[in-house]
């Protein structure tokens, strides 16, 4: 009588089916759980790297601004003082017994002083215009780019207009000054920012992918996403190192400019004392006094070389041979 066994078979099949369904349900739950946990781990990893990058971005921008402020201060004070004092002296000759600078002609001296005077005037215009004139990354642009370049495009009376313009045109400066990876804002060309040769993806694009994967994608697709996230995290870490290098280099040239300024201030005081005691005719000065005047000129040249040195090029990289320039200028200062 086989019929009585049918309910048992059906019951067994149902039990087996229930077990399979339960196993599938459990596996699905585990997959969802693992997918969510992986998404959270990746998002946390990315956010840490991005936060560190943003922190260094802000620090780098502030370093540029600090150096830009120092540049303007040097031009508006020290270099203005140098020009006003040095121009009082007549018959300057750096080819005499006291000075063996055969490469400097009187026309070279006049041309140099005139160029400084132009920068002094423009720096004064910037500072007279006040804080509003330095908006839009202008102060950072002053720090990142050589003084000659920043002022070159400006006509008399509109000196600072070029600074914010330069900051806006330079993708890296625009980003450092407030452009955001998250919004694809300033400094983001074609959806990416290239910093030091590293192409960074907009933050929200990556974040949305993580979110979508954690809610809709399968576990295997989440693991594929892991590789993408790790790639972007590595880019952020590399870009952070670039920012650190830029900031450290800017700090070095900032300190160099400040040291040169202090040396020139001291020598300007000596030059004023000579003029006060001996008058304004270079020919009436002793050999030692003529050397002091020459030292003033040489220090002014060094400072101009420093201030005119561009730190950051349009590609977001440190300018070529920048460290060699810093080393060379430091060596020159040791002679004083």
Image: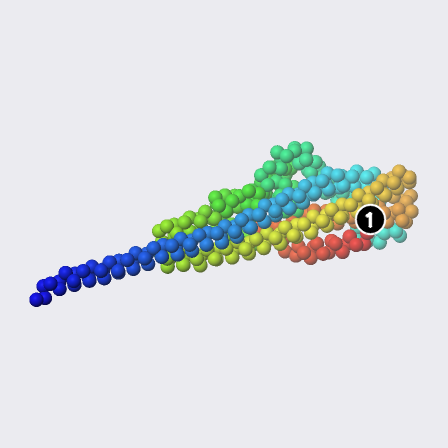
Q: Which quadrant would residue 227 be assigned to in this image?
A: bottom left
Q: Is residue 81 visible?
A: yes
Q: Position of residue 130 (x, y in %)?
A: 65, 33
Q: Residue at x 45, y 47 (%)?
A: 204
Q: Residue at x 84, y 54 (%)?
A: 100
Q: Position of residue 3 (x, y in %)?
A: 9, 63
- Quadrant containing the N terminus is bottom left
Q: Secondary structure at mark 1?
A: helix
Q: Residue at x 14, y 60 (%)?
A: 7
Q: Residue furthest left?
A: 1
Q: Is residue 119 visible?
A: no
209 horizontally vs 236: left or right: left
Q: Position of residue 73 (x, y in %)?
A: 71, 40
85 horizontally vs 16: left or right: right
Front residue (pair 199, 155): 199
286 horizontally vs 261: left or right: right
Query: How does the figure colour the protein chain or chains?
Result: rainbow
The residue carrying mark 1 is 295
Front residue (pair 324, 14): 14
Q: Position of residue 290 (x, y in %)?
A: 87, 47
Can you say whether 10 is above or below 129 in the image?
below
Q: Residue at x 53, y 43 (%)?
A: 179
């Amino acid at each position: 009588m086989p019929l009585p066994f049918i309910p048992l078979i059906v019951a067994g099949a149902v039990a087996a089916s229930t077990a399979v369904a339960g196993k599938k349900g459990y596996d699905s739950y585990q997959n969802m759980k693992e997918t969510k946990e992986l998404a959270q781990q990746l998002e946390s990893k990315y956010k840490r790297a991005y936060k560190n990058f943003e922190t260094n971005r802000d620090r780098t921008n502030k370093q540029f601004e600090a150096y830009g402020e120092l540049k303007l201060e040097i031009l508006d004070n020290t270099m203005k003082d140098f020009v006003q004092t040095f121009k009082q002296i007549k018959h300057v000759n750096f080819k005499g017994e006291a000075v063996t600078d055969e490469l400097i002609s009187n026309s070279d001296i006049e041309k140099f002083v005139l160029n400084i005077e132009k920068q002094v005037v423009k720096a004064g215009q910037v500072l007279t215009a006040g804080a509003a004139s330095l908006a839009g990354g202008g102060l950072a642009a002053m720090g990142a780019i050589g003084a000659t370049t920043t002022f070159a495009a400006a006509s008399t009376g509109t000196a600072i207009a070029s600074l914010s313009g330069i900051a806006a045109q330079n993708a890296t400066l625009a980003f450092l000054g407030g452009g955001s990876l998250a919004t694809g804002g300033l400094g983001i060309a074609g959806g990416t920012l290239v910093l030091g040769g590293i192409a960074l993806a907009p933050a929200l694009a990556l974040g949305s992918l993580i979110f979508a994967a954690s809610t809709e994608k399968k576990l295997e697709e989440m693991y594929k996403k892991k590789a993408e996230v790790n790639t972007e995290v590595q880019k952020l870490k590399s870009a952070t190192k670039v920012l650190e290098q830029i900031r450290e280099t800017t700090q070095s040239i900032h300190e160099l400019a400040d040291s040169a300024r202090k040396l020139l201030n001291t020598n300007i005081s000596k030059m004023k004392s000579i003029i006060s005691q001996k008058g304004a005719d270079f020919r009436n000065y002793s050999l030692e006094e003529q050397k002091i005047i020459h030292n003033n000129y040489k220090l002014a040249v060094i400072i101009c070389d420093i201030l005119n040195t561009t730190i950051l090029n349009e590609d977001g990289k440190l300018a070529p041979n920048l460290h060699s320039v810093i080393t060379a200028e430091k060596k020159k200062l040791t002679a004083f």
